[in-house]
Image (cartoon, rainbow, N blue to C red):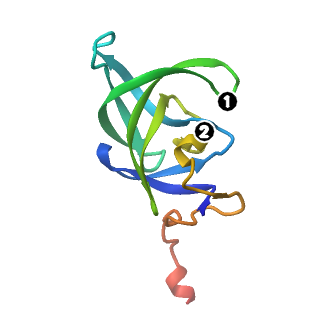
Amino acid sequence: MFGWREHVSLPEWGIPRLRAKLDTGARTSALHVEDVVELEPGTDDPRVRFHVLTGPRAEPRRIEVTAPVVGHSVVRDTRARAEHRPIVRTRLVCGPLDREIEISLTDRTGMNFRLLLGRLALLDVALVDPTHGFRVSDPPRSPQRPGIEDRE
């Protein structure tokens, strides 16, 4: 049983912690990326290079990733506009879940979560509790507020 939001890792890409929304209403998974460049399109081994942002929005860490393109898909964004996206595959780890998933690469600027996990990523292995977040992963770290120790 997973919460509606969890922390996940994408170890093949060197991403140890990324906040994700588990969305059973979405068929596919989507990751916010920047600077997408398709390498060698039209060849037998198309690849894509992009940056994944992690950490706080005010000071994000940019991780460069190069991955094989496993396909392209036309996906409707949150405003119902059709968008042509490259699809990549990588390993996702979240609590007891450890599996290869397909992710579409897109610009999720303005969204609360950089990663949206759709139902295909969760198929046959997960139930989602819509009333709780962080059931299998640690909740966000909150910064220590000044003066707390003085009140104890």
**Residue at (52, 35) in percent of width and height:** 30
Taking the spot 44% from the left edge, 32% from the top edge, the residue there is: 33
The x and y percentages for residue 86 are 44, 23
Q: In the rendered structure, are the residues bearing label 1 and label 2 in contact, judged by CB atoms less than 8 Å apart?
A: yes
Residue 118 in sight here:
no
In the rendered image, residue 96, in percent from the top left (x then y), is placed at: 46, 63
- In the picture, the disc for residue 78 is 1
Precedes in sequence: disc 1 or disc 2: 1
Report the amino acid beneath label 2.
Met
* Quarter placement of the C terminus: bottom right
Q: Is residue 107 visible?
A: yes
On residue 111, which mark appears? 2
Q: Image point 62% across, 61% down: which residue?
A: 133
Q: Quadrant of residue 71?
A: top left
Give me the C-alpha separation between circle 1 and circle 2: 10 Å
The image position of residue 134, as x and y in percent, is 57, 63
Answer above or below: position of 67 versus 132.
above
Q: Quadrant of residue 63?
A: top left
Q: Please, what is the three-letter code of the amino acid marked with disc 1? A: Thr
Q: Nearer the viewer, residue 130 or 61?
A: 130
Of tags 1 and 2, which is closer to the observer?
1
Q: Residue furthest front?
A: 124
Q: Quadrant of residue 82?
A: top right
Answer left or right for 125 relative to 98: right
In this rendering, the answer to whether 91 lies above or below 7 is above
Is 86 placed left or right of 76 in the picture?
Answer: left
Q: Is residue 143 above or below residue 47?
A: below
